[in-house]
Structures are given as structure tokens and as C-alpha cells.
């Protein structure tokens, strides 16, 4: 996974397993590629901001032009301090379909909560980095389900957070890679 301090360049650390466990049910936002316009051959990105620059988040799964797609993407992981507002922004098509935010543990295996987002909202700022009890957690933007599209597969955009309590973390190289 990549660890990013808000506003700093990503640094590699060990890749998390379990991305395939993100399950949700899909929508037809792929009908317009998530852009509000004509069909596209790429899945949309969402953005996250927590005290620094906006960071793009690619999906791990998405219903694209009627076909369920799974992607081998690494979710960003951001170093954050306590009591920082998290801003999540989705494309218009995802907002029109509806979406929520699922809160997962540090291994992205156990869902520990879910936050509903008001219908039609493209930006959601009601999550704080101190809301989740564990200091390391994931937020997953999940597009609402359309059981007729892609056998119910939804878009899912995970982003990890490491709450540092004001202390900078050191990072390590990916497993099997020489440390630099």
C-alpha cells in the first residue's frame, strides 16, 4: 500500500490483502463513465482530502458499460492527525445513483460501521479521523446497488487512514523489495 501524509509524496509499504473482500452492490453510473456525459471505457475516480491535498482514489471494482470489473489497484493510505475532517467527493453519476461510506478495520476485512450519504450529494464532509476507534482504518466509498446491472456489483473505492496522534510514522519498502 502507499502511505501518504496529506500533501506529501506516497511512500511504499507492505501491500494489504483482502481488497477482493470489499462487497457491495452496483449501480449504473458506468452508463456514463461516472462523468455525467457519454459512455466511457474507464471507471471514475473519487477524491479524498484530510487536511492536505486532494488525493484521487481508483476503484477496486466497478460496473462499467454493463460488465462487472475488478481492478488490481492499491488504495491510498493517508497519515492523518486526530480530529481532522475527511472530505470525500464522487462524480455526479455516483451521486445520482446514491452512495455510502463503509468503515473497515486495518486489514480491510471487517466492516465496523457504515455512514449514509444524503441522496444526490457529490461531497460529504461528515466524517472525522477520530470517529473510528482504531487508529488504522479504511473508508470505502460504495455506490448504491442496481441489481439489474452487473449482477449487483457496485463501485467500491477504498482509502486507508493511519491516525498518527501528531507523531510522524516511518514507512518500509514493500515486502520482498530492498529498502532504499
Image (cartoon, rainbow, N blue to C red):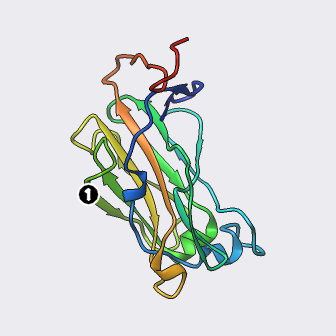
In this view, the residue in front, 110 or 142, is 110
At label 1, counting other C-alpha atoms closer than 10 Å, the crowd grade (few under 14, some 14-19, many 20 or more) is: few
Residue on which disc 1 sits: 113
Q: Residue furthest right?
A: 38
Q: Is residue 94 left or right of residue 165?
A: right
Q: In the rendering, at what x and y percent does residue 91 appear?
A: 62, 63
Q: Residue furthest front?
A: 176
Relative to 56, say whether 145 is above or below: below
Q: Residue furthest top?
A: 180
Q: In the rendering, at what x and y percent does residue 168 appear?
A: 40, 17
Count the numbered circles shown.
1
Which residue: 39% across, 50% down?
139
Which residue: 33% across, 61% down?
115
Q: In the rendering, at what x and y percent does residue 122 appear?
A: 55, 63
Relative to 137, say whether 175 is above or below: above
Which residue: 70% across, 62% down?
42
Which residue: 35% across, 16% down?
167
Question: What secondary structure is marked by label 1?
Answer: strand
Relative to 151, say whether 137 is above or below: above
Q: In the rendering, at what x and y percent does residue 58 appear?
A: 58, 51
Q: Is residue 4 left or right of residue 164?
A: right
Q: Is residue 35 left or right of residue 101?
A: right
- Where residue 37 sits, quadrant-wise, is bottom right
In this view, the residue in front, 66 or 35, is 66
Relative to 68, say whether 103 is above or below: above
Quadrant in which the C terminus appears:
top right
Amino acid at each position: 500500500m502507499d502511505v501518504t501524509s496529506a500533501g506529501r509524496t506516497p511512500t511504499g509499504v507492505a501491500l494489504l490483502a483482502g481488497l477482493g473482500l470489499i462487497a457491495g452492490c452496483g449501480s449504473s453510473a458506468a452508463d456514463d463513465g461516472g462523468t455525467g456525459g457519454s459512455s466511457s471505457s474507464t471507471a471514475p475516480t473519487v477524491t479524498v482530502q484530510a487536511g492536505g491535498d486532494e488525493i484521487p482514489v481508483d476503484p477496486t471494482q466497478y460496473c462499467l458499460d454493463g460488465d462487472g470489473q475488478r481492478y488490481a489497484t492499491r488504495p491510498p493510505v493517508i497519515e492523518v492527525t486526530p480530529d481532522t475532517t475527511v472530505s470525500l467527493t464522487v462524480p455526479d453519476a455516483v451521486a445520482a445513483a446514491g452512495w455510502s461510506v463503509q468503515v473497515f478495520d486495518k486489514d480491510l476485512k471487517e466492516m465496523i460501521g457504515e455512514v449514509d450519504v444524503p441522496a444526490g450529494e457529490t461531497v460529504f464532509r461528515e466524517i472525522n479521523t477520530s470517529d473510528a476507534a482504531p487508529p488504522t482504518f479504511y473508508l470505502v466509498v460504495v455506490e448504491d446497488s442496481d441489481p439489474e446491472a452487473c449482477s449487483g456489483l457496485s463501485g467500491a473505492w477504498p482509502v486507508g487512514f493511519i491516525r498518527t496522534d501528531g507523531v510522524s510514522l516511518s514507512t518500509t519498502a514493500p515486502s520482498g523489495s530492498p529498502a532504499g
